[in-house]
Structures are given as structure tokens and as C-alpha cells.
């Protein structure tokens, strides 16, 4: 979705990617909170994507592809973009107290988030490498 946003391909949204924030947690925190969760080894909306609810299945994710700078489909591997979109999904509700940090594009967004969450927000970190 962020790629589509970066290219202006999301109907009705024109603000670009810089206002987009990431609420970051961990699989361990979600599991310890006894929330229902699953993860996929590819884009969850595809009919042939597999869903898992056991951390022992994490090897099903293409971890090398997760760290690759480019992950478009290529003739030798036309399924790369689907696999790169593996997801970790939590059912129904995600509690705020499990948010461990907030990642933003730059200082301007960090200031906005900090102002909105005045008090004791989770740490706000700049992660420009997460954006296009």
C-alpha cells in the first residue's frame, strides 16, 4: 500500500507517504497478551497464500526477500512481490499499550505525532529507509 501511496495511486488520498506512521510492536508482545493472531507467507488477500498460527512456522517466510531492496517479480521468480507482502494480523483489536515505538519519515511528522500524544508516547524514531 505504501508503494501505491508513494506513486499517487490511492484514490482519494493525496498527502503522500510522509504523514504515514508505523505503530511498531513485536510478535512476542502480542503472543504474551494472549491475542488471537496469524501470519502469512505472502499477501493475505491472495487465494494461494498460507496462514499460520505457530511461531515454529516462521521459516515459511522468505526472510532474505524481506531484507531485499528490490522485490519486484522477475522471470525466474514471478511470485516475489506476493511473498514480500507477508503479514502479521491480530484479530479484532490491538491494544495501545503494546505499541513499543512509532516510526515516522522525518522530523516534521515526529513533531506532529509527539504533539498529538503529549505526555508519554512510545519512542518516536525516524526510519526513512522504510519509505520509498
Image (cartoon, rainbow, N blue to C red):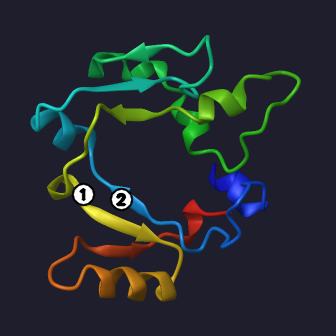
Q: Are marks 1 and 2 in contact (CB under 8 Å)?
A: yes
Snapshot quadrant of residue 117? bottom left
Dot 1 falls on a residue whose secondary structure is loop
Lateral position of residue 48 relative to residue 56, left or right: right
Q: Residues within 10 Å of mark 1 (few under 14, many from 20)?
A: some
Q: Position of residue 69 (x, y in %)?
A: 68, 51
Q: Return the residue nearer the eye: 84 or 118.
A: 118
The number of numbered badges drawn on the structure is 2
Please identify the quarter of the rendering in which residue 45 is found: top right
Please give the label number shown on residue 39: none
Q: Earlier in the sequence, mark 1 or mark 2?
A: 2
Relative vertical location of residue 14 with respect to residue 100 in this rendering, above or below: below
- Residue drawn at (79%, 60%) of the image: 7
* Side of 92 relative to 130 (left or right): left
x and y percent of residue 39 in the render? 39, 26
Residue 120, percent from left and from top = 15, 79
Calculate the distance from the C-alpha at mark 1 to the C-alpha at mark 2: 6 Å
Q: Residues within 10 Å of mark 2 (few under 14, many from 20)?
A: some
Residue pointed to by mark 2: 23
Camera-nearest residue between 71 and 104: 104
Residue 30 versus residue 82 in the image, above or below: below
User: Which residue lies most toward the right here?
Assistant: 75
- Tell me the residue at 48%/81% (across/down): 109
The answer to whether 79 appears left or right of 128 in the picture is: right
Horizontal and vertical percent position of residue 15 = 66, 73
Q: Is residue 11 left or right of residue 37?
A: right
**129 w.r.t. 98: above or below:** below
Kindly state the secondary structure of the residue where label 2 is placed: strand
Point out the image quarter for the C terminus: bottom right
* Residue visible at 36% across and 59% down in the picture: 23
Q: Which mark is residue 99?
A: 1
Amino acid at each position: 500500500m505504501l508503494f501505491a501511496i508513494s506513486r499517487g495511486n490511492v484514490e482519494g488520498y493525496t498527502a503522500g507517504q510522509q504523514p504515514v506512521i508505523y505503530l511498531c510492536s513485536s510478535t512476542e508482545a502480542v503472543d504474551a497478551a494472549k491475542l488471537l493472531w496469524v501470519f502469512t507467507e505472502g499477501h493475505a488477500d491472495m487465494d494461494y497464500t498460507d496462514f499460520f498460527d505457530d511461531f515454529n512456522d516462521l521459516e515459511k517466510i522468505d526472510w532474505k526477500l524481506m531484507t531485499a531492496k528490490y522485490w519486484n517479480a522477475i522471470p525466474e521468480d514471478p511470485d516475489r512481490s506476493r511473498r514480500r507482502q507477508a503479514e502479521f494480523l491480530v484479530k479484532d483489536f490491538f491494544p495501545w499499550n503494546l505499541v513499543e515505538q512509532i516510526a515516522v519519515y522525518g522530523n516534521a511528522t515526529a513533531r506532529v505525532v509527539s504533539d498529538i500524544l503529549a505526555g508519554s508516547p512510545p519512542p518516536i524514531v525516524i526510519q526513512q529507509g522504510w519509505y520509498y
